[in-house]
Image (cartoon, grey):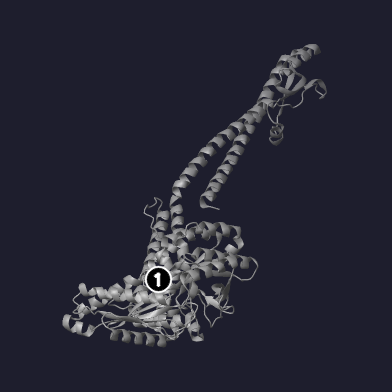
Amino acid sequence: MTLSRQLIMLVATLVVLLFLGTLAISVHNTRDYLESQLGSHAQDAATSLGLSATSHVAKQDRAMVTSMVNAMFHRGDYLSIRFEDLQGQALIERVTDLRVEGVPDWFVRALTLEAPQRSATMMSGWRQVGRVLVVSHPGLAYRKLWQTAVQTTRLFLIGALLVLLGGLVGLRILLRPLKEVEWQAEAICNREFPVVERQPFTLEFRRVVEAMNRLSSKVARMLSDSEQMAGRLRQQAFQDPVTGLANRRQFMDVLEHRVAEPDVFESGGLLLLQLKDLKGFNQTHGYAEGDRLLADAGKAIASVVDDLPRATLAHLSGADFAILLEGIGEHRLRDLAGMIVGAVGALYGRSEIPSSDVAHVGGVPYEGQSASDLLSQADMALREAQREGANAWVVRRHREDSGKARSGSEWRGLIERAIHGHHFSLLRQAVVSCKDGELLHHEVFLRLRDPDKPDTDIAAAVFMPMVESTGLGALVDKAVVETVLTALEEGAYPGRVAVNLSVSSLQEHGLLDWFLDTLQQHRVAAGRLILELPEYGASANVEYLVGWIDRLSPLGVEFSLDHFGKGFSSFTYLRSIKAHYLKVDGSFVRNLDQQEDNQFFLRAIADIGHGLDMQVIAESVEAESVWHTLQGLGVDGGRGFWLGRPE
């Protein structure tokens, strides 16, 4: 019950008690007064009648006495009139029933008026000749008492109504600061930190508002400090200070993580770029100009791969750059190698580079090699490019016949047939709580049946880039969500289930309405659904994602950011997204027990996530030592082969 309602009820109770007390006192005093008046009235009547009838009684003129009694009694002001002799025998007696007109019977029964009997002695000289006994009729008194009660009640109701109306207005004004404080508290829970500018007049409320303002500012400052600290830590540990790109350590962590998880990195390639004679350039123009050349080269490479969100660009050391590309085919890899050489070669006209021979690129497509083999083969391709001449590039194949090449039209047909014929399957992997080892939810992974190899499934990392490029992301997402909803209703999955969405689906016209309509038809299953998006997709589509969360969260749907921390974007956008889970990229988790910088970074992410009411999940938990390390960092859960393989 709200405070205003409680106060209104308290005021109303006090007013009612005050009214009842006032009414009781007023009625009691009025009744005492009326009983006294009835007694006086009866006494006056008895005295007057006794004096006027004494002579007639003495003469025993009964007819005259009867006439006098009847005349007085018929006026209706008396309940009884009695003439009696000295022995108490009635000579004349008139009695009427107690009937009160205009007054409810319940009122008469509830408030009994005692009409006193009064008497007068009739004297003839010094001799007593009889007595007159008179009881006044209380009807008039009852009417007066009823009128008093009615008028008092009417006056009370009018006064109470005015008091309640005034109280409502006054309480609304008085409690307005509490409404603002409530709004402020809800905003803090929703990861917003407003300050109430208007100070209330009431001293106690003003102190509450000031305390809430300090709390909001302090929480916002603490989160900002945590975000800045995490950002600085990430820059120091994982970012090259000259180019702003990932450093060698970060690149190697990502590369080793990707090649160790085929579900994440099934297709793509590695490109190595080396600027020519950077050492001589530094000796001629100074290290400051050399750093500027490195930064310009990094920007030139980034301009080519900016539209590839799954690309990892790094400055390894000196004149060496590396570009890890995920989800692309060999032809696309060759195109990018040529474009990168051209973009970096264009620096010749804008910088003090002495020769038009600026850089060389060597690359190799990923075909299941280890990280060291991939680097070695790319380096061999780079040396071959350097031998070929100015600004040359070479992309070598690891195997001549990999059996993976399909044209774009073939991929489109394969994917469309899989959607319409349900030629895909789902694997699930458990996400486990760090606190007690209990299941938090399952994450599902999509597989496509390979028509060329019936016993082989194609991982999402292979065909999802084709799905995105052919514009079929929305259709795939619909098919997967419908399958998961059906499985949830059939009891195939315990607890919640996380489903990965295509980034392009966020902007797909009409898809959000489809999700809303479909989930409303499966409300129970919808309350167990988690929709996941990679961090790069969320940070690039914040406005769209906020709209999805606002419309689907009331149905119980939760949202998760996948592969978090891989990019170098600011953490501040997390406040507006209001996601429920942060899943830290596996490159920070692999070998976590041996890397203190990663531990500090993961703890910072956990602090930020918890401050924003998010659960933080670690991906790629592959060893018991990593799991035990995670349990001491404030992370909520983990997913990986050590905790359970996909089923």
Name the residue type under label 1: Pro
Residue 463 screen position, x and y as percent: 49, 73
Q: In the rendered image of this protein, does residue 280 appear above or below residue 299?
A: below
Residue pointed to by mark 1: 309
Among the 4 quarters of the image, the one containing residue 105: top right
Q: Estimate the x, y position of residue 139 in percent, counting from the top left.
A: 69, 26
- 67 w.r.t. 432: above or below: above
Q: Position of residue 399 (x, y in %)?
A: 44, 85
In the image: residue 423, left or right of residue 134: left
Determine if residue 529 is in view. Answer: yes
Residue at the spot 65% in from the left edge and 69% down from the top edge? 491
> Split into 4 quadrants, where in the image is the C terminus?
bottom right
Which residue is farthest left? 284
| 369 vs 326: above or below | below
Q: Secondary structure at mark 1?
A: loop
Q: How many marks?
A: 1
* Residue 499 is at least partly visible in this image: no
| Front residue (pair 245, 367) | 367
Q: Nearer the viewer, residue 253 or 104?
A: 253
Q: Residues within 10 Å of mark 1 (few under 14, many from 20)?
A: some
Residue drawn at x 33%, y 71% is 304
Residue at image location 53% in from the left, 52% down from the top? 2
Q: Position of residue 18 (x, y in %)?
A: 56, 42
